[in-house]
Image: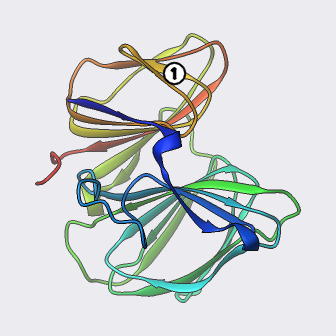
Amino acid sequence: MIDVRRSADRFRGGDPASGIESLHAFSFGRHYDPDNLRFGAILACNEERLEPGAGFDEHPHSHTEIVTWVVEGELTHRDSAGHATVVGPGDVQRLSSAGGVRHVERNDGDAPLVFVQMWLEPLSPGGDPSYEIVRGIADSTPYALPEAGAMLHVRRLTPGERTAVPDAAAVYVHVVRGEVRLGDAELGPGDSVRIVDAEGLELAAGVGLAEVLMWEQSNPPGV
């Protein structure tokens, strides 16, 4: 099963008056769609745009694996466990909220900030919060998230380049930038694909550079 979701169909949230624009791929906040609550372990895939000086004040999370990918700009992160970092393009940031943690996310820079944040449900709730940042993750180097039974693949494709979609029970594809083709589907920035029982599939970049995030999941949706 291949289910293409377009960027234009995302739910718009955030607070534009405060310099925050959010685009949600799944039910989020006041927007509730009982048929679009999750895909496997993935609970949220939010595109966030913060103007300089804008941000999310301290707020709590629990029992969620939060993975952030910066598209442009710099994200300032601080949490109640004592971590304080600046996350840039090419860095993978993971916050395991576990039994509970509070954090702040801001654009303290002079340029607009764009990032993609993905929330995954852990296999086992509770425990102690943890934090990790991988600086400048290399292309095709997977980032394992065993806490959620998932693995993140980052692909940066040159024009016309092809890459395999992982063979897995479930794969979630998010196009960060550029254009790619999956079978007969043309995908652009912000488009996503939910694939069940992925096998023998390929992504092909268009005429420009492309950047794609792919979540490989060991369990099928609903398991």
Tell me the quarter of the image containing the N terminus. top left
Tell me the quarter of the image containing the C terminus. bottom left
Q: Is residue 209 left or right of residue 187?
A: right
Residue 44, given in percent of the width and then of the height, sits at 40, 59
Q: Is residue 193 left or right of residue 105?
A: left
Residue 183, given in percent of the width and then of the height, sits at 35, 15
Quadrant of residue 101 within the rendered picture: bottom left
For residue 110, above or below residue 214 = below
Compare residues 119 and 164 and report the one nearer the observer: 119
Name the residue carrying label 1.
Answer: 180
Could you classify mark 1 by the number of other residues whose Cα lies within 10 Å: few (under 14), some (14-19), or many (20 or more)? Answer: many
Q: Residue at x 16, y 48 (%)?
A: 219
For residue 63, above or below residue 14 = below
Residue 159, given in percent of the width and then of the height, sits at 62, 13
Q: Residue at x 84, y 65 (%)?
A: 109
Q: Residue furthest right?
A: 110
Q: Is residue 75 left or right of residue 145?
A: right
Quadrant of residue 104 within the rendered picture: bottom right
Q: Residue at x 41, y 66 (%)?
A: 31
Compare residues 149 and 183 and report the one nearer the observer: 183
Instruction: Inspect the image, locate mark 1, and give the three-letter code of the amino acid beneath it.
Output: Val
* Disc 1 secondary structure class: strand
For residue 198, above or below residue 49 = above
Quadrant of residue 80 within the rendered picture: bottom right
The image shows a total of numbered marks equal to: 1
